[in-house]
Amino acid sequence: MAGNKGNKRIFTAAITGSIHTPSMSPYLPITPEDIIREVVAAYEAGAAVAHIHVRDPITGQPNADQDIYRKVAVEVKKQCNIILAFTTGGKLGEPVESRVKVVSNLSPEMASLNAGSLNFALFHVVDKIKEWKYEWEKEYLEATEDFIFPNTFKTIRQYLEIFYANNTKPEFEIYDLGMINNVAFLLEKGVIKRPLYIQFVLGILGGAPATVENLVYLVQTARKSLGDFEFSVCAAGRHQIPMCTTSLLLGGHVRVGLEDNLYLEKGVLAKSNAEQVGKIIRIARELGIEPATPDEAREILGLKGIDKVNY
């Protein structure tokens, strides 16, 4: 069962993602060693969860290399007990069947599960980049003008069968209002099991804009449709800290990290995920909120425990 969080909240660091490219920041983690180091530093800064994508260690292109996932998981587990939440979004355009393999292979405590399809667009940032480090970057971003991030009812159902067979908790990523309806439908049909953990993702072109009004409306609508759940919030770019602070005020958890935002403040690139974790925890403490430890987060979310993973 999920536990009572009191004044403890879960702080997640989304380490590298599949949105940003190496030309956007020299601090974006690329290699497995980069990712491992960043996860441990985020843990030391107060993060209880790390959200994991991996990349080609030579070019930095996002991929779903199962050997790299395992290497990251094994090495991090040797150094700390942070919860690893693996992506099933993968890179943009990743085949649906390969996106969920990490759950079958590693049987993690938690993994993301996107609650619907959307136009996930990044093409509008191309003009802001003056020089490209790698050939793949510009084409990868431009292709999103004609890209749908597919998460159908069928694939969500198939993913959940694999999640539940591995006792891996789904973190439902909700980018827009309709995705709450998708979760409500699947909950009613018994495809989704309680307790629920939701991540509201704001500020993606193709999803809901990152405003306080939208977040409040999404949370209230979800409460009416879904009943009890734990939720976290992440937001793209400059919206990250304001939306995460709003989540804290609403009783939610938060996600920061270089997947969502490359900056620490206006005009200042974040040198690490840990810098962003430290910043939002300082804000939280001003509000009387303390970071949950990984084991406290496990209790809040009702996770199976690090002793039951396959890595």
Image (cartoon, grey):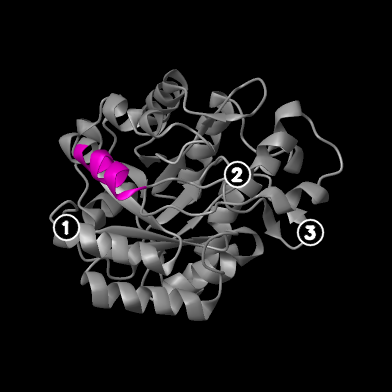
> Along the polypeptide, which appears first: circle 1 or circle 3?
1
Dot label at residue 267: 3
User: Left or right of 90: which side holds 29?
Assistant: right
What residue does disc 1 label?
Answer: 194
Label 1 element class: loop
Q: Position of residue 289 (x, y in %)?
A: 41, 70
Question: On screen, 229 above or below 163?
Answer: below
Residue 85 vertical placement versus 187 (above, below): above
Mark 2: give few (<14), some (14-19) or many (20+) Cα within 10 Å.
some
**Front label number (1 vs 3):** 1
Q: Along the line of sight, which residue is nearer the eye, 51 or 173?
A: 173
Is 245 on the left or on the right of 129, as rendered?
left
| One can see residue 239 in this view | yes
Residue with the mark numbered 2: 19
Residue visible at 43% across and 21% down in the picture:
71
- Residue pushed farthest right? 130
Snapshot quadrant of residue 205: bottom right
Kindly state the secondary structure of the residue where label 3 is placed: loop
| 198 magenta-colored | no
- Vertical placement of 61 versus 41: above or below? above
Question: Is tag 2's residue or tag 1's residue first in the polypeptide sequence?
Answer: 2
Q: How many marks?
A: 3
- Tell me the magenta residue range: 152-161
Q: Position of residue 283 (x, y in %)?
A: 53, 69
Residue 195 appears in the rendering: no
**Contact (Cβ within 8 Å) of mark 3 with mark 2:** no
Disc 2 from disc 1: Cα separation: 30 Å
- Residue 251 vs residue 81, the one in the foreground: 251
Q: Give the amino acid type for the residue marked by disc 3 in the picture.
A: Gly
